[in-house]
Image (cartoon, helix red, strand yellow):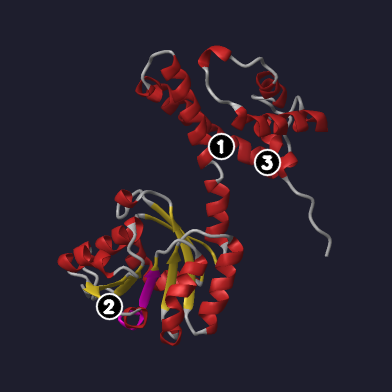
Amino acid sequence: MPTHDPTPVTVIGLGSMGRALAEAFVAAGHPTTVWNRTPAKAAPLVAQGAVHAPTPRAAVEASPLVLTCLTTFQDTRSALEPAAEALAGRALVTLNSGSPAGARALAAWATGHGARFLAGAVKNVPSAVGAPDTLLYYGGDRTVFDAYAPTLRVLGGDTVHLGDETDLAALYESAVGAMLLPALVGFFQGAAAVQARGLEAASMVRYAEKWLDMIKALLPVFAREIDSGDYTDAASSVNLFLADADADPDEDTAVETAWLAPLHDLVRRAAAAGHGEHSISALTEVLRKPRQRA
């Protein structure tokens, strides 16, 4: 059978996630070059076999595949500015936070300098990088994804190309990420309520996990309702949630619940708009902003 030499890879940005990405490439046998604004962060990776480039330009020039893992798209551009001329003909893959507009702007800048561009996201914590079920998704140049898919799968076995639009990963990051803070704050509120009764927060974990499993099972149902626009088969109606929104607060728990007020207001608006007997997924209609006419 023919064998192929592992693709050389450069990783720019060595925070906790960037370090995990570089470690995965080194462990998989890819010649790995790293650069970070704080050089000391490269030392543990050099000890594992990576090469520390002295400048961003040297880092870019070292590999045909360049991954950046910085905080925002603007941070990525700022780091790469000194290496802009070296990007020509190389594949640039970004794994950072930011808006769809930020992804489009960076894509235009990178392709303007001759790079082939993918913008992606890692949908897990650094310790999960390299696991078979770790999800990463990308939007942008399909030829880059196809050429480097085996290398990118080193970072996670569930690796997906969303489409050729360069802002798709940022779009899905925004869409999926919107669930995180409300879910966590809900758990934290529950933990505070349990502790107010002298119980440990750990005592509710089993039940919270079951609750999240139920929510997970409902997501395909809600998605079908939203896509079809038919909210009439209501297993959980807006009015059911309205009753909870209008219930008297339990003062005994001594827990701050003001963060729920905007969510309860959203339920009231949905009921006022005629969705009271409809599925709770009809809140999507209240959340939509009217499209601007061209």
Disc 1 + disc 3, Cβ < 8 Å? no
Q: What whole-number distance in Å separates the C-alpha atoms at marks 2 and 3? A: 49 Å
Residue at image location 44% in from the left, 87% down from the top: 85
| Residue on which disc 2 sits | 53
Give above or below for 283 relative to 256.
below
Q: Quadrant of residue 20?
A: bottom left
| Residue on which disc 3 sits | 226
- The earlier-in-sequence mark between 1 and 2 is 2
- The earlier-in-sequence mark between 1 and 3 is 1
Q: Closer to us: mark 2 or mark 3? A: 2
Q: Which residues are magenta?
A: 60-67
Q: Amino acid at mark 2?
A: Ala
Q: Magenta segment: does it hold 193?
A: no
Q: Could you classify mark 2 by the number of other residues whose Cα lies within 10 Å: few (under 14), some (14-19), or many (20 or more)?
A: many
Q: Closer to us: mark 1 or mark 2? A: 2
Q: Amino acid at mark 1?
A: Leu
Check disc 1 and report its element: helix, strand or loop: helix
**Residue nearest the observer in this picture, 247 or 213:** 247
Residue at image location 52% in from the left, 47% down from the top: 177
Where residue 150 sits in the image (x, y, percent)? 33, 66
| Residue on which disc 1 sits | 219
- The earlier-in-sequence mark between 2 and 3 is 2
- In the visual, does 146 lie left or right of 280? left
Where residue 294 sits in the image (x, y, percent)? 83, 65
Q: Magenta segment: does it hold 66?
A: yes
Residue at image location 60% in from the left, 32% down from the top: 259
**Residue nearest the observer in this picture, 44 or 168:** 44
Give above or below for 60 relative to 264.
below
Q: Is residue 265 visible?
A: yes
Where residue 214 sits in the image (x, y, percent)? 50, 28
Residue at image location 43% in from the left, 69% down from the top: 93
